[in-house]
């Protein structure tokens, strides 16, 4: 994997940041779709679980 995905002058887009954000968007879409099949659990709960997982994944990857 290339360390820099896009470079426009001073703007750098590291591949790691792009794919982490892309994975987070896909995970949110899957979580919302799966969450609708379980009507007992409110949607706000799934949003909180996503935020906790996102923050834990970010800091876990940075520490690793």
Image (cartoon, rainbow, N blue to C red):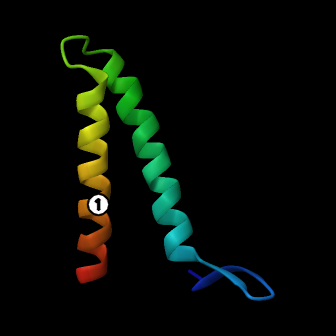
User: In the displayed structure, would residue 41 be above or below residue 49?
Assistant: above
Quadrant holding the N terminus: bottom right
Residue 55 x %, y %: 29, 60
Query: Which element type, helix, strand or loop, lies under badge 1?
Result: helix
Residue most extreme to the right = 9
Residue 47 x %, y %: 32, 36
Quadrant holding the C terminus: bottom left
Q: Residue at x 18, y 12 (%)?
A: 40
Q: Residue at x 41, y 40 (%)?
A: 28
Residue most extreme to the top = 39
User: In the displayed structure, would residue 42 be above or below residue 61?
Assistant: above
Residue 51 x %, y %: 30, 48
Residue 3 x %, y %: 57, 86
- Residue 63 is left or right of residue 18, and the answer is left
Residue most extreme to the left = 40
User: In the displayed structure, would residue 42 be above or below residue 2?
Assistant: above
Residue 42 occupies quadrant: top left
Residue 58 occupies quadrant: bottom left
Q: Is residue 64 visible?
A: no
> Circle 1 sits on which residue?
55
Label 1 Cα neighbours within 10 Å, binned few <14 / some 14-19 / many ≥20: few
């Amino acid at each position: 994997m290339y360390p820099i995905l896009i470079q426009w002058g001073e703007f750098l887009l590291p591949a790691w940041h792009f794919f982490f954000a892309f994975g987070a968007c896909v995970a949110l879409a899957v979580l919302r779709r799966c969450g609708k099949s379980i009507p007992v659990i409110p949607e706000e709960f799934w949003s909180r679980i996503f935020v906790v997982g996102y923050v834990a994944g970010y800091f876990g990857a940075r520490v690793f």
